[in-house]
Amino acid sequence: MHVDMNAFFASIEQRDKPCFQGQPIAITNGAKGSCIITCSYEARAFGIKTGMRFTDAKNKCPGLLRCVSDPQKYTKVSSKIMKILYDISPDIEIFSIDEAFLDLTRCKKIYSSPLDAAYLVKDRLFRSLNLPCSIGISTNKSNAKFAAKMKKPDGITVMDPNDSEGILSKYSVKDLCGVSNGMQSFLNYHGVFICGDMKNIPISILGDKFGNIGRKIWLMAQGKDIEELKLHVNTPKSLSHGKITSPNLKNEYDIKKILHLMSEKVARRMRQNGYESNIFLIGIRKKNDWVSKKYKIVNYTNHGGDIFELCLKLINNNLIKDGIYQVQITATNPRPIGIQNDLFLKGMPDKLCLDFTIDEINEKFGSLVLQPARLLKKLDSPDVISPSWRPNGYKKSV
Ligand SMILES: [Mg+2]
């Protein structure tokens, strides 16, 4: 089963703000964001799409309302959705902030049919969150995802595996998940325009050019995806946060503020996901090159102040005088917390306790009511949701 929330961010805003209900609305990053992240179905009826510039969209639909994105809210709702889905089947792969695959194989005794489980999903999502979704059901991931797209919004589509090849055969190869523009051109060059054309070329043509993903697409076009659900989460190789600064930034206070903010963000992300690290890569981009240094510290940490101290080691007057363009902070060696620390370690428990308390308060009263004084006056660029974000506990990467 593939579950896909419909116009996810826009549906949440329409649910929460009566003035948006039934209206064409477009979500942008911040009040001045030029690009549309997503829009409501009422806006889509005017031909408005994700990625379009807000000013262009406004020309197509003068009544279009702008809504500023609220990433904290969307990630919270996403976590609730995934929890509901996890109760339907614990064999779940979270595919994005608003999509998941559920394997129902081991739930055969619980639900009388897959369709029955789909109605239950819709009912629970609607009752507890009042949000619509589309559901696709089939015998593999690609078919289920394709089926979910067939009735939007609010539909359920069952794709019988015996019919899948025939159904898919009429659709453009571009409609398959994972076919890039480059791959589409390559396929067109070889005479493959619709999925039904795929069986006319050997799998090796795609395999030689694109490797495993090429072979996978060849199978998917014929309804024969073989990829298993990714149920287990590996420890990430790194966690990082970066920011493009205003160009040629030379104000020492502002530079330190950005480094401090990124340090706190990396630290918070590590805490939220249960990691700590002892190797950090601090990078600062000047006009034409990067200045970066890897720091290894004795004690593993996920405390923002510790990471910021490393940043202070890297910046110096020359660097500030030259002007900076971008910063990047990466924890390169994360490990799950809970591994016993040095028994004679001093200082850590206080910091841990402080971070835990601050995180709890921020979680309860909204994002960042408590933070270091330097960061209280916000930078003017809005938060965005990282594409790899996943709710706690079930993510592939962080
Ligand atoms: Mg969606």
Image (tube, rainbow, N blue to C red):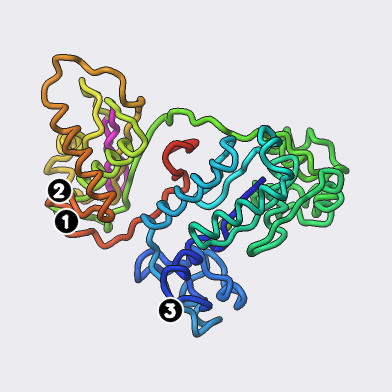
Percent across and percent down for residue 138 are: 74, 45
* Residue extent of the magenta highlight: 279-293
Q: Is residue 99 above or below residue 313?
A: below
Mark 3 lies on a secondary structure that is helix
Q: Residues within 10 Å of mark 3 (few under 14, many from 20)?
A: few
Mark 2 lies on a secondary structure that is loop
Majority secondary structure of the magenta segment? Answer: strand
Q: CA distance from mark 1 to mark 2?
A: 7 Å
Residue at 64 percent across and 64 percent down: it is: 153
Percent across and percent down for residue 159 are: 78, 50
Image quadrant of residue 101?
top right
Label 3, ligand 1: CB separation under 8 Å: no
Please name the residue that numbered disc 1 is placed on: 376
Residue type at mark 2: give it. Pro
Mark 1 lies on a secondary structure that is loop
The N terminus - image quarter: top right
Residue at 68 percent across and 49 percent down: it is: 145
